[in-house]
Image: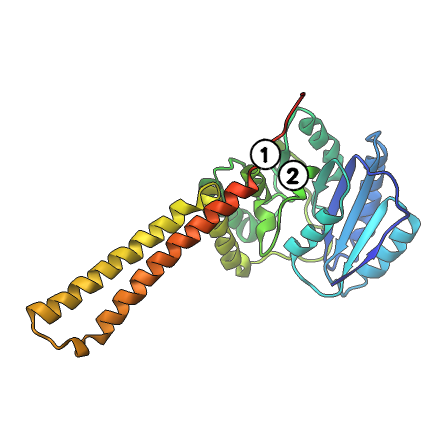
Amino acid sequence: MSAHLQPDPSAPPYLSVVVPIYNEVESVERLWQAIHPVMEGIGKSWEVILVDDGSRDGTRAILRRLAAAHPQLRVILFRANFGQSAAMAAGFAATRGEIVVAMDGDLQNDPLDIPNLLDKMAEGYDVVSGWRKNRKDKLVLRKVPSKIANKLICSLTDVRLHDTGCSLKAFRGEMLRRIALYGELHRFIPALMRIEGAEIAELPVRHHPRRFGTSKYNLSRTFRVVMDLTSIRLLMKYLVNPLVFFSALMFFFLLCGIGSLTALLYMVIGRGAPLGEMNVLLTLTVVFWTAAVQFFFFGLIGKLIVTTGTRKTFLQIGQ
């Protein structure tokens, strides 16, 4: 799926910066030139991981050259375009830092905000999310859909942020590396980390107009986002006790089975219909009750998995 260009192994850094890249041939070198002095100024060890999501415009050649010249730059090259969530997941898995910062590669996020995110993290937070207070995107194509999506995401995930779509975020590395990303779940990382018990804060950050290339976002991704949002909602509501969710399904199919059985008895006893002509109602009754039993056992298995998995999710301090 991907090829790695890595420097000589060294001690784990304090800070890892992950940037997904896709067809940013005009931006990628400028991005490195903007990130590098900021990293040098933080006074702690660091690494930058640029993940190329199958670019076809010459971006990869520049990344190879930069990685060869700078040992603190690590590059991951995808052989095809797998999407932003896959790129971020690969970058997060490759990080070694205590703190992980994610940002876009189109120069709209400003690396100068990274020290501010670190200062906020030092107050004890596990996630610090950027807030593009003065956003520089086009009104109709980006701002309006973003505001609608933001309200929907916040209402369903109970994570109160002004700007859920801002890619510039800082995370506690240990917690972040436990998160599995797929689909469009990179939009919901704070919500996924809230499930892990993360403390979340928000910080206003700079936002610049896009100078090069074209936006990779469009309205066609809305359906996938809605589906993933539904998954997140179910996870947040029923992760601790999945038996509640499956019990609701069990009772629904149980009632459907009772209804079909009642109709069957009415037709056979009340109307005198031959039982052999009631195959549809008889089959529905069996199917509904079988589904009810299956969902009940799914709930028991889910409860057992959760109970087993949470036995070691605590931290002991002292003796």
Residue contact at pointers 2 and 1, CB within 8 angstroms: yes
Location of the N terminus by quadrant is bottom right
On screen, residue 254 versus residue 119, left or right, reads: left
**Vertical placement of 179 versus 126: above or below?**
below
The quarter of the picture where residue 116 lies is top right
In the rendered image, residue 30, in percent from the top left (x then y), is placed at: 82, 48
Q: Earlier in the sequence, mark 2 or mark 1?
A: 2
Residue topped by disc 1? 198
Q: Which residue occupies the extreme top position in the image? A: 319
Say whether residue 152 is visible.
no
Taking depth in this image into account, of 214 and 281 the one nearest to the observer is 281
Residue visible at 16% across and 65% down? 263
Local crowd size for mark 1, using a 10 Å CA cut-off: few (<14), some (14–19), many (≥20): some
**Numbered label tally:** 2
**Vertical placement of 248 versus 154: above or below?**
below
Residue visible at 71% across and 40% down? 101
Taking depth in this image into account, of 1 and 65 the one nearest to the observer is 1
Residue visible at 25% across and 61% down? 257
In the rendered image, residue 52, in percent from the top left (x then y), is placed at: 75, 57
- As drawn, the label of residue 123 is none
Tell me the SS state at disc 1: loop
On screen, residue 247 versus residue 24, left or right, reads: left
In the rendered image, residue 253, in percent from the top left (x then y), is placed at: 30, 58
Residue topped by disc 2? 175
Type of the residue with mark 2: Met
Location of the C terminus by quadrant is top right
Type of the residue with mark 1: Ala
What's the distance in space between the residues labelled 2 and 1, CA to CA? Answer: 8 Å
Tell me the SS state at disc 2: helix
On screen, residue 172 versus residue 13, left or right, reads: left
The quarter of the picture where residue 100 lies is top right
